Amino acid sequence: MAKNGRSGTDRGSSTIWLKPAKRARDVPALTRDRIVQAAVEILDMLGQDGLTIRKLAEHLNAGAASLYWHVETRDDVLELALDSVLGEIPLPTEPLEWEKEVARFLTEWRQTLLRHPWSTSLFGFRPLLGPNALARSEHLRATLKRTGLPEVDVVHAGYTLSNFMLGSVATQVAWQAGNEAETRARVTSFLRENAAEYPALSSQIESEPDDWDESFSRGLGWIIRSLAIL
């Protein structure tokens, strides 16, 4: 997974994965899993700004105080929700050549995040220490070890691949936040009117890809082929 964390904050030490789990009280119907599922539903509908402890409690038909038995803060909920989403990335059911598996895995990871656009803003929020995140980090590193590269290069290759994928998703989410076709038309008009200031950008307008899947696949292929010849 990508490097993450913010300088000047104590995000790492406050991660929910390093806090001891509490035993269930007398209301077994409300569980951490139910809270996380409800949080993902709200995030998918309203985005990150739409999630509050109060709204989450209402969605669960529960009191806010009962939620605090399972999670201490809204940040805890966001961290749990992100790991839940990462759990949707399927792990392989049969062995593939490392090149094919890296391509499959990164493509599935990208598609998973695109189903939950809010998730992209949470990378770098806290260290990815949840069980689903660690399992998928382990899988990517183990797959890249089959390249025969030195361990340090395997680590850098993992960062390169995950950061490329995350950048691709973040860019697509940003462009599709509004009317993508209208935004593209306005950008094209602006660049043509300012061609003297942006000669390279304006000359490449017609070459700018509008197929996000094809663009990602091509870039991913370049990285994988580069790793294969190192």
Image (cartoon, rainbow, N blue to C red):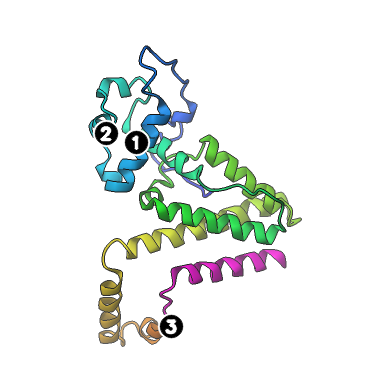
Q: In the rendered view of the protein, which quadrant contains the C terminus? A: bottom right
Q: CA distance from mark 3 to mark 1?
A: 42 Å
What amino acid type is highlighted by mark number 1?
Ala
Q: Which mark is residue 207?
A: 3
Q: As rendered, which of 218 and 198 lies closer to the eye?
A: 218
Residue that badge 2 annotates = 59
With respect to residue 86, does 99 lie above or below? Answer: below
Q: CA distance from mark 2 to mark 3?
A: 46 Å
Q: Which residues are magenta?
A: 207-230
Pointer 1 or 2: first along the chain: 1
Residue that badge 1 annotates = 38
Left or right of 105, for residue 54: left
**Residue in the picture at 41% in, 39% down:** 81
**Residue in the picture at 64% in, 64% down:** 224
The answer to whether residue 76 is visible is no
* SS type, badge 1: helix
